[in-house]
């Protein structure tokens, strides 16, 4: 019985999704992750980059984070509800962290 | 349990190939949301009375100056346990009782998304409540306030009894119960609504349950970590809140209130949801500004995260932090105020019936406004510096939590009791209960505003005479005993109505929402046919399809019914009861309790419970038993064969 | 037709939900959302107390960045094997899934063993839970992460063993997907920890 407002879900729902990455894609992403990790370590050892190391590392790790979440966890292709229910708390956690670091004067924009 | 209800529950047949347990075991192994809701409600009310007893002892001690009813140490345990019990073991679980009983019925579902997880939540809650209260017989209850500020709770300052350890582990256990429930209701509300029930057609109580569940799942991890850190400090000797190692005890306060402030919204939103459902029913008018009320609830949920440090104005955060949190706190009064106006708007022009649920709902509005006003007074840091740690705050708390949450919960009890038991609570005793509560509450707590502003501090077991505090305290204590009497009236009403109350029928209140379309008490499967929803207040729409002018026109009996239900006869599947949630829950609680079993004597500087390093000792046998039970429970649960009928 | 909840195996086939999404998947993503707050609080603790230890050893005294980057690499690769396991079972290939699942569990075990080795080294260097703020916050943060990895390994081994009893087939790919979501999350937390604890200069 089909109702207009609900849909059947089968376990292989993902096989009905378009643009489902295949093994090759995943390996490519894994290679990118490995490369970024190597870059992070190289940057860590460059004395000349010390003044800007924090933003560089934060950006690089954010890229790794996003790649795993969007592709390995399939969030890019799944229903937006999943994105909301994950990124909402993620942003909250980040905001709380920033607020605490500010209050404890651990970041530059503290009082 | 009413005979009618007992008959319905007893009539569940055993089907070949399905599990069935009789008598008390049907309650222990149930996965039915209605039964679990009843378990929650009864247990919560018992804890409520325990918390009330603790309050009576506090008030007895404070009735006259220099009193000797209890010692200072005992007094500390009393106010700590009173608050911990009321917040975690009474108010929250009572709200959960309603989530359980009402939400699936309001959204047209047969049960929650994860029935066994639901059962697990209840048993973990019960075990957690027992664990915390067992501290009374194992050396002493926690005594550092329900907020357990470090480093007063650290070993050097709190090592005479194990109370704090019981508090830490008990709260961790309770946290797991709360979170499991939160996930369950989140998925249930998002995923199991009847066809046609969009979010904007859900009853407000369900809306508030949704927001509360999200708050729960986000706030509890924070206190879980804080408690872990405190536990490691006490058990293992780490330095999270140890100033001699360079740590800052203020961090505890930040973490606690990051949890604690969303927690108070967790406490009030369900009651607001109840009021939002009760008022329209007893005004025979739809909720005024439904979308605004719903969105205000969501806004409160968001803003709850930005105000926590208003509990810390007197800790020296600095003018910038103080100002920021003061502004955010005043802002959060806005969506709350919006709700108040919408509730009033619902009543204006309505055909009001002042039955007991309505009385409590209106009482809620009045009391909560008073509590909200004192809250705004506390939102100003300079004012707070005078008011903090005085009875002014105690007055505020109780106006919002008793006058607010408890009144809302009582409204819910009178409103939904007929649905659960099939009988009505007595109206005469209901009104006596209401007025005694109203009078008792105000006599107890209103004077506390004054005596607090006059300087009387909180959490001190006595006070000298000659401060001008004698008479207000005596009045307050008298009020507390009036409240005790009101509870007795309620208990009498409850017990006698369960047995001899008037038979209620499906729809005793001429209700507006789906739960009133099914028999009282509901059959195990709730709905014979899952309804198709066409509007907000679907049952009202069905009974009185509006015609021009918006006047209610009763539908021809039977006709509307047929039109509403879907054509096909459905195969109704009811999941079987399961033993695993119970054992997983008990196993988990024992694992935690076992951490308290220690052969090491408690002296300053020596850690309690398990020592990890240096000088590692064996894990306690109780934890091992608990862990094995829990793992067996979890594996059994995961691989349980499909069964049901 | 509203959802009636059924135990593990058969739930997915009968599920009809308001959003069309699986209940269990929604549960897992909500859980991961709450875990963001859990690890966020632990990481906040670490960062608030960063550089505030009164006595050593300090991070710069004990950290071996090349070593830790290898273990970070191991965990990243385990995410790859995990997603390959999922792809395999989604295409009905149980044998391939087993191979990749085992690989993931083994890589996870290597990671945790690597941490145990790393931490015993730190302890030998004089860093304990009780020594200073660094020891306290570091070991508790990474310890809870390691515990999460261990739980993940146990889950993966359970699915692996269950597949031999014929209990994991193409229609059960949701179970593998959910285990995968948990596993990737644990990996992602390590990405944050590796950067914020090890790499940011002291």
Image (cartoon, rainbow, N blue to C red):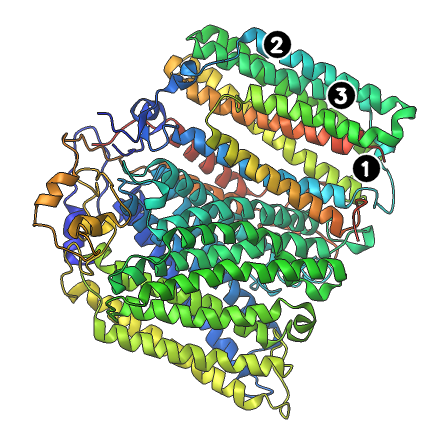
Callout 2 secondary element: helix
Chain to which mark 3 belongs: C
Towards the viewer: B281 or A93: B281
**Residue under numbered circle 1:** C127
Chain to which mark 1 belongs: C
Towards the viewer: A65 or C103: A65
Position of B354 compared to B564: left or right?
A: right
Number of numbered tags placed on the structure image: 3
**Residue under numbered circle 3:** C69
| Residue depicted at 71% across the width and 31% down the height | C193
Position of B548 compared to C153: left or right?
A: left
Pinpoint residue C190: horizontal percent, then vertical percent.
67, 28
Q: Earlier in the sequence, mark 1 or mark 3?
A: 3
| Residue depicted at 30% across the width and 31% down the height | A5
**Residue under numbered circle 2:** A27
| Residue at mark 1 to residue at mark 3: CA–CA distance | 20 Å
Marks 3 and 2: which is nearer the front?
Answer: 2
């Amino acid at each position: 019985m089909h109702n207009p407002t609900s849909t059947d879900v089968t376990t292989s729902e993902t096989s009905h999704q378009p643009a489902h990455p295949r093994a090759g894609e995943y390996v490519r992403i894994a290679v990118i992750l490995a490369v970024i990790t190597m870059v992070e370590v190289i940057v860590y050892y460059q004395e000349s980059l010390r003044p800007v190391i924090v933003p560089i590392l934060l950006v690089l790790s954010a890229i790794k984070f996003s790649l795993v979440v969007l592709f390995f966890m399939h969030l890019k292709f799944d229903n937006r509800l999943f994105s909301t229910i994950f990124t909402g708390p993620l942003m909250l956690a980040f905001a709380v962290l920033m607020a605490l670091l500010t209050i404890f004067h651990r970041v530059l924009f503290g009082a | 349990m009413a005979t009618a209800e007992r008959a319905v529950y007893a009539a569940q047949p055993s089907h070949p190939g399905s599990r069935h347990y009789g008598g008390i075991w049907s309650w222990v192994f149930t996965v039915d949301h209605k039964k679990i809701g009843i378990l929650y409600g009864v247990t919560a009310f018992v804890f409520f009375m325990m918390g009330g007893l603790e309050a009576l002892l506090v008030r007895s001690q404070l009735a006259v100056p220099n009193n000797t009813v209890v010692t200072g140490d005992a007094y500390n345990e009393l106010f700590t346990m009173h608050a911990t019990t009321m917040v975690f073991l009474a108010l929250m679980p009572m709200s959960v009782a309603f989530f359980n009983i009402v939400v699936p019925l309001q959204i047209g579902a047969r049960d929650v998304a994860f029935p066994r997880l639901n059962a697990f939540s209840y048993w973990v809650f019960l075990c957690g409540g027992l664990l915390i209260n067992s501290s009374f017989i194992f050396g002493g209850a926690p005594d550092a306030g329900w907020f357990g500020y470090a480093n007063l709770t650290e070993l050097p300052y709190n090592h005479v009894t194990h109370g704090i350890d019981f508090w830490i582990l008990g709260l961790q256990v309770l946290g797991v119960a709360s979170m499991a429930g939160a996930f369950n209701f989140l998925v249930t509300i998002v995923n199991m609504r009847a066809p046609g029930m969009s979010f904007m057609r859900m009853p407000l109580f369900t809306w508030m349950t949704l927001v509360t569940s999200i708050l729960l799942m986000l706030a509890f991890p924070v206190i879980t970590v804080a408690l872990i850190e405190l536990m490691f400090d006490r058990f293992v000797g780490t330095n999270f809140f140890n100033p001699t190692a360079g740590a800052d005890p203020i961090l505890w306060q930040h973490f606690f209130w990051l949890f604690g402030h969303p927690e108070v919204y967790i406490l009030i939103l369900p009651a607001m949801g109840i009021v939002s459902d009760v008022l329209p029913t007893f005004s025979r008018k739809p909720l005024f500004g439904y979308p605004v009320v719903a969105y205000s609830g969501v806004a409160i949920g968001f803003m709850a995260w930005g105000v926590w440090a208003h509990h810390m104005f007197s800790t020296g955060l600095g003018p910038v932090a103080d100002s920021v949190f003061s502004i955010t706190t005043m802002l959060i009064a806005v969506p709350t105020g919006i709700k108040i106006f919408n509730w009033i708007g619902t009543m204006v022009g309505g055909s009001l019936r002042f039955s007991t649920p309505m009385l409590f709902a209106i009482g809620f509005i009045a009391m909560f406004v008073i509590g909200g006003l004192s809250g705004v007074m506390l939102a100003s840091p300079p004012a707070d510096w005078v008011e903090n740690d005085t009875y002014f705050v105690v007055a505020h708390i109780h106006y919002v939590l008793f006058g607010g949450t408890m009144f809302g919960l009582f409204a819910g009890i009178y409103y939904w009791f007929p649905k659960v038991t099939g009988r009505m609570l007595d109206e005469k005793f209901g009104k006596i209960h209401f007025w005694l509560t109203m009078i008792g509450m105000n006599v107890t707590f209103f004077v506390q505003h004054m005596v607090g502003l006059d300087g009387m501090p909180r959490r001190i077991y006595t006070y000298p005479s000659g401060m001008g505090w004698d008479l207000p305290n005596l009045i307050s204590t008298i009020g507390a005993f009036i409240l005790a009497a009101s509870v007795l009236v309620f208990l009498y009403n409850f017990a006698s109505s369960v047995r001899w109350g008037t038979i209620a029928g499906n729809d005793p209140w001429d209700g507006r929402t789906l739960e009133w379309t099914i028999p009282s008490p509901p059959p195990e499967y709730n709905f014979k046919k899952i309804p198709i929803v066409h509007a907000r207040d679907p049952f009202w729409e069905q009974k009185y399809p509006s015609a021009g002018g918006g006047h209610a026109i009763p539908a021809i009996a039977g006709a509307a019914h047929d039109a509403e239900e879907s054509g096909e006869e459905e195969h109704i599947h009811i999941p079987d009861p399961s033993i695993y949630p119970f054992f997983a829950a008990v196993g988990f609680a024992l694992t935690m309790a076992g951490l308290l079993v220690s052969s090491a004597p408690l002296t300053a500087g020596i850690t309690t419970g398990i020592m990890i390093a240096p000088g590692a000792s064996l894990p306690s046998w109780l934890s091992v038993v608990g862990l094995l039970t829990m793992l067996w429970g979890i594996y059994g649960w995961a691989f349980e064969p499909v069964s049901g009928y | 037709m509203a959802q009636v909840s059924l135990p593990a195996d058969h739930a997915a086939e009968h599920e009809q939900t308001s959003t069309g999404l699986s209940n269990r998947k929604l549960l897992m993503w909500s859980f991961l959302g709450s875990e963001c707050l859990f690890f966020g609080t632990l990481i906040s603790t670490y960062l608030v107390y960063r550089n505030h230890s009164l006595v050593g050893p300090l991070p710069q005294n004990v950290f071996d960045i090349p070593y830790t980057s290898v273990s970070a690499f191991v965990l990243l690769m385990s995410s790859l094997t995990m997603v390959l396991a999922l792809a395999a079972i989604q295409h009905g290939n149980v044998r391939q899934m087993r191979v990749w699942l085992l690989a993931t569990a083994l890589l996870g075990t290597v990671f945790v063993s690597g941490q145990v080795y790393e931490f015993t080294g730190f302890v030998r260097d004089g860093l304990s839970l009780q020594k200073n703020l660094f020891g306290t916050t570091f070991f508790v943060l990474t310890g809870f992460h390691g515990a999460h990895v261990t739980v993940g390994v146990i889950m993966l081994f359970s699915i692996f063993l269950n597949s031999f009893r014929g209990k994991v087939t193409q229609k059960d790919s949701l179970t593998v997907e959910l285990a995968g979501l948990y596993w990737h999350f644990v990996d992602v937390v390590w990405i944050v920890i590796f950067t914020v604890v090890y790499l940011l200069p002291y």
